[in-house]
Each structure stands twice: as C-alpha cells, then as structure tokens.
Amino acid sequence: MTYTTAIFYFFSAILVFAGLRVITARNPVYAALYLVLAFFTAAGLWMLLEAEFLAIVLVLVYVGAVMVLFLFVVMMLDINLDRLREGFWKYLPLAGLVSVLLMIEMALILGGRYFGLEVMGTPSPQPADYSNTRALGRLLYTDYVYAFELAAVILLVAIVAAIALALRRRKDSKFIDPAEQVKVKRDERLRIVKMAPVKREEWGARGEESKP
Amino acid sequence: MDWASIQTVVWTLVKILALVVPLMLGVAYLTYAERKVIGWMQVRIGPNRVGPLGLVQPIADGLKLLMKEIIIPAGANRGLFILGPILAIAPALAAWAVIPFTDTLVLANIDAGLLYVLAITSMGVYGVIIAGWASNSKYAFLGAMRSAAQMVSYEIAMGFALVGVLMAAQSLNLVDIVKGQAGGFWHWYFIPLFPLFLVYLIAGVAETNRAPFDVAEGESEIVAGFHVEYSGMAFAVFFLAEYANMILVSALTTLLFLGGWLSPLPFLPDGILWWLLKTGFVLFLFLWFRATFPRYRYDQIMRLGWKVFIPITIVWIVVVGAMMQTPYGHLFH
C-alpha cells in the first residue's frame, strides 16, 4: 500500500464515520459539527485528486461561512428532540425512495466499467507547477462565461429576494442612521435658556421645602 | 514506507518546530510589548518587576497559568469544552505553513497559498463558537454569537481586498506576490491598492477580535465573552491563538501590501530583517489602536463591515480592473 492509498483510506474512514454521525447524532449541534468534519475530510480527498482549488474553496465557503451560520441558527433554536422524531414512519417511504435513487446514481459511477465509462479514461497527473486555479478561471471566463454569468445573476436575484422578503421597517424602532447622526447641528439638539439670577437665600428656602 | 520518505517526514517536523517555537516566543513577547507600549501611551511604566525591565514577565505569566487548575463547569459539555481552545489555536498555527520569510525560507511554497491562508483562518471562528456554546453560560454564548457574526462579515471584506492583490500580482502564490512588488517602496501594492490596504488592515483587527472590535469579550457588557468559563492553560490557549493570529495578520499585511522581505530602497539588500521590521510595525499599529480607540457599538461594527467596507472593496476592484485595460495599467502591476 502506498502512502497516498493509506491517506485515502484514512480520510475515507473519517468521512464515512462523520457522515453516519451527521444523521445519527441526537443533538443537532453535534450533527452540524460532524458535517463540518465531513466537509473538511472531503476537502482532503479532493486534494488527493489534485483539485486543490475546489478543496480549498470547499473549506473556505462551506466550513468557513455556511456551516458557521448554520451552527449559529442551530445553537439559537430550542429544539425538542421528541417532536423531531414524530414523523419518522410517515416520511420513511419518501426517504427510502430518495436513498434508492442516490444508491443507483452511486452504483453508476462506482461500477463505471460495467457501463462503458472507461471511454472517458483516467485524467493524467499534472506536473507540480500546474495551476489548477488559473485553469479553472480561464475556463470559467472564456468557454463557460455565459453559464457563469447566468449563475451569478440567479444568485443575485436570490440575494435580492431574500432581503426583500425579510426586510421590515418597524415604526417604533429606535434605530438612528449614523449619517444623520453625524450631520446633526447644535441648534437641533440644544436650547439655551436665559434665566434671571436667583438669590441664595431663596434657593436655600426652596431646598428645605422640597426635602422629602 | 522507505527510508527516504521517513527522512522527509522527520525533516519536515523539525522545520515545523523551528517555525512554531519562535512563533510562541514571539507571542509571549508580544504580550510583554503590548503591556509596555500601552503603559507608555498611558504614562505608566508597565511590567517591570520580574527580571531586568520586566523581561521575564511573560514566562512568569505562562508558568502561573500552567500551574492553575482547569475548571470545567458542571453544566458544560465536557468534550466540546476542551475542543474549543484546540480549534482556536490549530488554524492560527496551521496558516503559518505557507507564510514565506524570504524567497527561499518557507515551509510549503504552495501555488494557492493565499487561498489556503484565507480558508484556514476562516476556521478559527469554530474555536470561539464551540467554546461559547459548550460553556453553557449566557455570557459565553452571547460572546460566541457576536464573534461568529462579526468574523463572517469581515471575512468577506478581507477576501475582496485579497482579490485586488491577486489581480495586481496575477498569482495566488505568496512568494510571487512579494516578487511582484520588487523595486523600491513605490512598487509596493499599498500605493495602487490603498483603499484595499486600509480595509484589509481594519478588517484584520476585526477578524482577530482585537480592540476596538473586541465585542466578543466586551467585559463591560458580557464579562469576558466566550472564554468567561475558562481557567488556567485552557484560557491561556485562547490568548496564544489570539496573539498568533495577530502576528499572522501583520505578516500577511506585510507580504501583500508592504513588500515582505524586500527593502524599501533598491540599493539596500533584501532580507528577513525587513520582514521582521514591517511585521513589527503593523503589530505596533494593533497595540496603538487598542490604546487609542474606544470599543465600537455592535450594530455599528456590522454596518461598517457590510455597508462601508464591502462597497469600497468592490468599487476598487472595478477600478483596478478598468485601469489595467488602459495605458496606465503598469501602475497597478
């Protein structure tokens, strides 16, 4: 067994274990943390496939941002574990169907030699100075530029829609716009009142009266 | 495994040690420098009792924390409580693998070095979140939530600032990025990318949870934030991570915008000394900020990150891209 194979089996074992724990862990926070572990290990496997750009971006986007927000939500929720289990039998047939489909798809890929996938051939290893990032970037912005731009526009629409759905202006909000705060003038906030001076004795007398 | 690969592994481990030991010493003496510098800025003396000029103070502090008991609260989640500090320090150290000190002195000169640093540092937030949640304390949890939201927000601005750098350098390799700035300080990227430089510097302060962005531990509101339940060495590990991250951000600022190990004037020799000087200067800025600015209010931090920094970076990326198509493009390379 070569060093690379050993690493592959090591990462795969962790990935399978983490994947199993994602669906079996009772506590949702644990499940989310195991999903983080699964993503990180998958990134390691992609690194073995010489897809270093995808591997690093997987860590950057999914581990570094998406899962953080996910954990953020899961930790804030007060989840009743018993109620989560209620619909288990009801949804079992649908879940079974989905898993059978997934298994068929996996079998098609893994058993490729029975379905004539061999014509694709294995990619040849690239030299050490080959830049995966540069190659991907060039393809994205030349050959696939329209698909790429389309995906970007769809994402933009999704962002705008999410903001539009969630944006509510409360009338009783005490939020102050910092730009308005900076622009404020003295006359708007401060009123100088001219008062006639009061003698000291009167002050003292008044002070006595107002004592509780 | 054959003999040669075992040798490679041992040699790499030796190099990792040669990197981590000076880094940890640097962290120890950064705490000393911080207390001294802030002391002088506030017209105090700072630590001066342990050893000459108080120079042994960080060692004494470390020993004290090592001797103390690590208390695990009764309601805490034991496993995750211990995992928290580990996850905080691991990325802070792992990111150093690709940081070059000179054009040959680098542990791993990988092609996508900049992306690697961004990905690894984005994992540092897990230490804070897990510590805050596992402590089973309101204050710790609030600190963790604040820190999670803040770090995710500022990472975007930071990432966009880096996009500007990689456009100018046309490489993700940190050694190549520094080499692209050769030829005197007027070739360093902080001049054509000045807005990105400022954004990166400030986002770096926010990313390391340092004052004036240290709301994750805002002691006036939430006691000490995410590490309120930690004691002894577990507490110290969070500090090691914070300071290691500070040095990392300073080193990155140096490499990306201030020419790394290159000398400011072409006739002076390049070398690691320049790297140390520039990183030291950026670290001094961190301490200076802490002594100068009061803490931000939380909603204003979010506003600054999303509504000020991200638009600035996007606009400047467009400016750099457009300028590169004009005859003045060489100014941006």
Image (tube, rainbow, N blue to C red):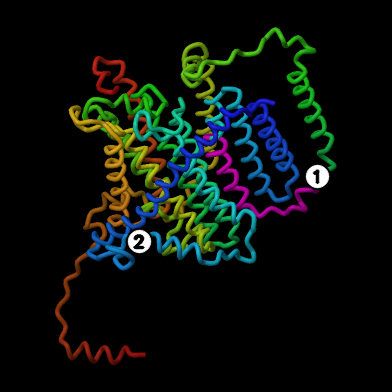
Disc 2 designates what residue?
A: B56
| Tag 2 and tag 1, C-beta contact below 8 Å | no
Q: Is residue B42 visible?
A: yes
The quarter of the rendered structure image containing the C terminus of chain B is top left
Segment colored magenta: A60-88
Q: Label 2 sits on what residue type? A: Val
Given the current orientation, which residue lies at the most extreme top position? Answer: A119
Instruction: Residue A16: give x, y in percent of width and height.
Output: 72, 36
**Residue B152 visible somewhere in the drawing:** no
Chain under numbered label 1: A
Query: Which structural element holds mark 1?
Result: loop
Q: CA distance from mark 2 to mark 1?
A: 63 Å
Residue for badge 1: A87
Q: For this rendering, which residue is in front, B8 or A29?
A: B8
Give the structural element (helix, strand or loop) at label 2: loop
* Label 2: chain letter: B
Q: Residue at x 52, y 25 (%)?
A: A53
Instruction: From the viewer's side, name the closer residue of B127 and B298.
Output: B127
What residue type is disc 1 on? Answer: Gly
Give above or below for B164 relative to A182.
above
Q: Is residue A77 magenta?
A: yes
